[in-house]
Image (cartoon, grey):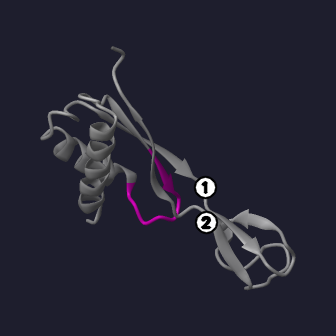
Amino acid sequence: MHELGIVFYIIKDVKQAALENAVSKVSGVVMNIGEVSTIVPDYLQDCWRWAADKEDLLRGAELKIHTIPAVTYCEDCHKEYGTVEHGKVCPYCGSEQTYLLRGNEVEIKEIEVPNQ
């Protein structure tokens, strides 16, 4: 389960941003997670709850996950299509000259703080 390691990196980055912005409490972290990123959202949530509650700054903070759909681009017909539904072979022209445009992201979108 690599989700725990990812959570430790998220916490490190959030703590650094909080320090740089004089934030003493975080109420939520919003993540963009690509559909084919290899992250299992439920595992990430479980790891987050366990690790975040060990930090005063993050205790009780919610982890919100936005799933970014995987989209592939075909170099031959110049069309985009859903990666999960069709894989590497373009459904429009049958070409394998394709590459992933988006859908493997793992990024912090925003950090939420309580109203002061």
The amino acid on which the numbered mark 1 sits, given as a three-letter code, is: Pro
Residue 61 vs 88, above or below: the answer is: above
User: Which percent across, then down, holds residue 74?
Assistant: 78, 75
Q: Are marks 1 and 2 in contact (CB under 8 Å)?
A: yes
Q: Which residues are magenta?
A: 31-40
Q: Quadrant of the C terminus?
A: top left
Per the rendering, the mark at residue 69 is 1
Q: Amino acid at mark 2?
A: Val
Locate residue 31, reporting x and y percent: 44, 46
Residue that label 2 marks: 84
Q: Quadrant of the N terminus?
A: bottom left
Image quadrant in which you'd find residue 81: bottom right
Q: Residue furthest left?
A: 54
* Residue 12, above or below 39: above
Q: Is residue 109 left or right of residue 42?
A: right
Taking the spot 57% from the left edge, 61% from the top edge, the residue there is: 103
Residue 49, numbered label? none
Residue drawn at the location 25% of the way across and 62% of the way down: 5
In the depicted structure, whether residue 80 falls above or below residue 52: below
Q: Nearer the viewer, mark 1 or mark 2?
A: 1
Q: Is residue 85 left or right of residue 6?
A: right
Front in this rendered view, residue 74 or 108 = 108
Where does the image place residue 92, in percent across and percent down from the top left?
Answer: 84, 73
Disc 1 crowd, CA 10 A, few/some/many (<14, 14-19, 20+): some
